[in-house]
Image: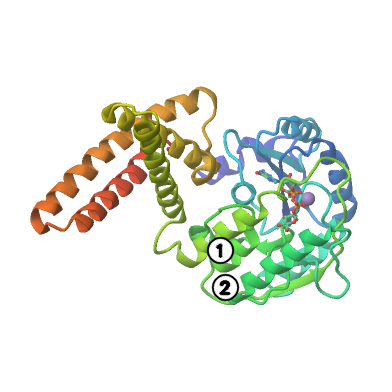
Amino acid sequence: MTDTNVRALPLAASPAAEPAVPLDLTVVIPTFNEAGNVAPLLAKLEAALGGLSWEAVFVDDDSPDHTSDRVREIARVDRRVRIVQRVGRRGLSSAVVEGVLSSAAPVIAVIDGDMQHDETVLVKLHEAVAHGGADVAIGTRYTEGGSTGEWDKSRELMSRFATWLSHKLLGSDVKDPMSGFFAVRREVFMEALPNLSMVGFKILLDMIASVDRNLKIAEIPYTFRNRVHGESKLDSKVTQEFGALLLEKLFGHIIPIRFLMFAAVGGLGLVVHLSTLGVLTNVFRVDFKISQTVAVITAMSFNYVLNNSFTYRDMRLRGAKFVRGLISFYLVCSIGAVGNIGVGDYIYNLHYRWWLAGIAGVAVGVVWNYAASSLVTWKRK
Ligand code: GDD
Ligand code: MN
């Protein structure tokens, strides 16, 4: 291809193309059921970002209230607005990551889609990382001049506790590591990317913990507003997901947290198995073989439901896929059981220690079940 051909590329030649003002800032907005907030938020962004060349990327997890369609209506007439609609997946952190990866700006800001974050602070966040030498700029609720607005006591206490915990565990003294409101230079984000665990919603914390050097962090205070439209999605999941992220960051490089959850569910399954067996044989005097079969199926079903709701909550199977998943899980676990018995038997014949044989059998069974079910039951698309 000659130089002339390159210059003649249709986009550059098209009379409809907008004047080439380079993009300064991409604002990534994760949404779930925020239809009523889309237009007002964009109006606020427009007012706040006047001096910058910006775009807004909504990353919506196929919200039942059709947030994506609401964004599209506006995006059709305003090229600064884009939508990434994700289907069959949930999660604030992973949504933010996909938004960032869809953009070309040198600086990326992340802001909630519900107007609880003060968008007038965005310019300062951008300034701090674009020209102020900071790697990350955080909108902070706890410095002088910032506040949590009208949070209820329990939520405020929990948030403070989580902040304290993350200081202790991650050795960072960021005032508001839980913030979902920040700006970062693209190359800093890319540095963190390979190590991100993307569990839950603490993308900022995840990012800071995923970079091997001490980042230069700017903190800019703001007042957290109350919600007007829609409702919070994080209230109920806050503790669980935060705990999972901390564990992952602490031990994730040794044992994947998913495996630990899977094994814990397996332990509960054993309790279910034995209780079912005990009740059927002792109370109802059912034949042992039948009792054992019923107990196996009960325990496997129990484990499947639990793993589907917790261990693999981010890939939860529903409807017909739920049934298909259950059947494949039965198959995987049956093979696991055969392996469990086989290895146990083998070790027993070598050492004649029942407990060692038992543990070896269970270990092989769990590892197999985990590996195989993550390949066939909850497979990544
Ligand atoms: N794509 C996507 N997928 N977006 C989501 C999901 C999800 O699974 N869950 C929540 N969101 C979006 C919401 O629509 C909203 O725009 C934003 O993420 C924050 O969710 P809220 O449900 O409004 O969170 P909050 O106000 O309770 O939590 C705030 O405080 C946390 C600290 O305790 C937010 O500022 C969080 O970012 C912050 O970490
Ligand atoms: Mn909110």
Q: Residue at x 41, y 43 (%)?
A: 269
Residue 195: where, in percent of width, then height? Answer: 49, 61
Q: Residue at x 43, y 30 (%)?
A: 325
Mark 1: secondary structure: helix
Residue 224: where, in percent of width, then height? Answer: 84, 59
Q: Label 2 belongs to which residue?
A: 169
The answer to whether the residues at label 1 and label 2 have Cβ atoms under 8 Å apart is yes
What scheme was used to colour the molecule? rainbow
* 338 is higher (above) or lower (below) than 139: above
As drawn, is 175 to the left or to the right of 99?
right
Q: Label 1 belongs to which residue?
A: 246
Out of 366 and 294, give the one closest to the viewer.
294
Quadrant in which residue 329 is drawn: top left
What's the amino acid at mark 2? Leu
Q: Residues within 10 Å of mark 1 (few under 14, many from 20)?
A: many
Q: Residue at x 80, y 43 (%)?
A: 231
What's the amino acid at mark 1? Leu
